[in-house]
Amino acid sequence: MKTLVTVLMMVVLAACSTQKESKETTNGYVIVLLGAPGSGKGTQAVDLSTKLAVPHISTGDLFRYHKSNGTPLGKKASEYFDKGLLVPDSLVMEVVAARVAEPDAQGGYILDGFPRTLEQAKELEKTVIGNKKLLVVNLDVPDADIVKRLAGRGRADDTPEVVEKRLQVYHSQTAPLIDFYRKKGVLIEIDGSQPKEKVFVDIVGALNSQGIRSKS
Ligand code: ADP
């Protein structure tokens, strides 16, 4: 009888500890792509999304989607992005929170264009990523190359004045995130001025060495 009780107690204890462990382990990963407008984040994010079989979440695309569908959020946000200004953090958090709550994002996702301010970066860790592992890839491209690339892209918000404004905003609001993430030890630095195929190989290699394996 005594032995039976002991065995039962051990089973219960083992079950409790397994439950605790599973709560503490990470549930996928969040890869943030950081870089100036035109640094190639979007292109790399699409290819990575296919390779790793996790969704690509672009706040720029989400805002453009809302704008073209004439939603109230799209109308509010376009007052800012049409001028090259950042959309207020509260609106950004609203679209991000809604998107990461969708079923396809539960095993992890790639963020492109978010976070763009320190406030958003803090909010990301506090309320969005949960127990997922965070890795940040910075695509480093000199400003002169950026201006040339954006001039050739031809998107509606890529007029010279708006491009200039977005670059200024990038340097003052977003570039400080590079240091923020470097200090946390989660930053992967990539030379984004290389041909896009080489940039991709470098990113995949760096992620592999962090334990993120591709599915294809
Ligand atoms: P880019 O290719 O210039 O990086 P995006 O497509 O990522 O542009 O975003 C387009 C515009 O949407 C930005 O210029 C900005 O106004 C707005 N936007 C996108 N993401 C954010 C964000 N995280 N915070 C604030 N504004 C954002």
Image: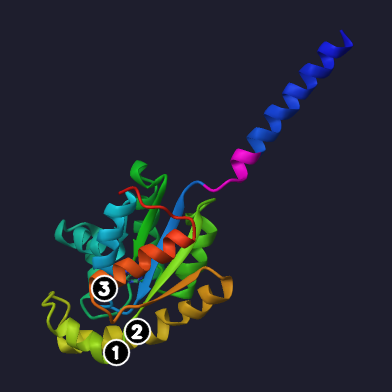
**What mark, if any, has residue 202 been given in the picture?**
none
**In the image, what residue occupies the spot 30% across and 86% down?**
167
Residue 85, placed above or below residue 31: below
Prevailing secondary structure of the magenta residues: helix
In the picture of the structure, the residue carrying the numbered disc 3 is 40
For the N terminus, give its image quadrant.
top right
Density class for disc 1 (Cα within 10 Å; few <14, some 14-19, many ≥20) is some
In the picture of the structure, the residue carrying the numbered disc 1 is 143
In the picture of the structure, the residue carrying the numbered disc 2 is 169
Start-end of magenta stretch: 21-26
Residue 19 image point, x, y percent: 64, 34
**In the image, what residue occupies the spot 14% across and 85% down?**
151
Q: Amino acid at mark 3?
A: Gly
Q: Amino acid at mark 2?
A: Val
Query: Is residue 152 shown to the viewer in this render?
Result: yes
Do the residues bearing badges 1 and 2 touch, measured as CB atoms within 8 Å? Answer: no
Q: Which element type, helix, strand or loop, lies under badge 2?
A: helix
Q: Which element type, helix, strand or loop, lies under badge 3?
A: loop
Sequence-first tag of 3 and 1: 3
On the picture, is 116 further left or further right than 156?
Answer: right
C-alpha span from label 3 to label 1: 13 Å
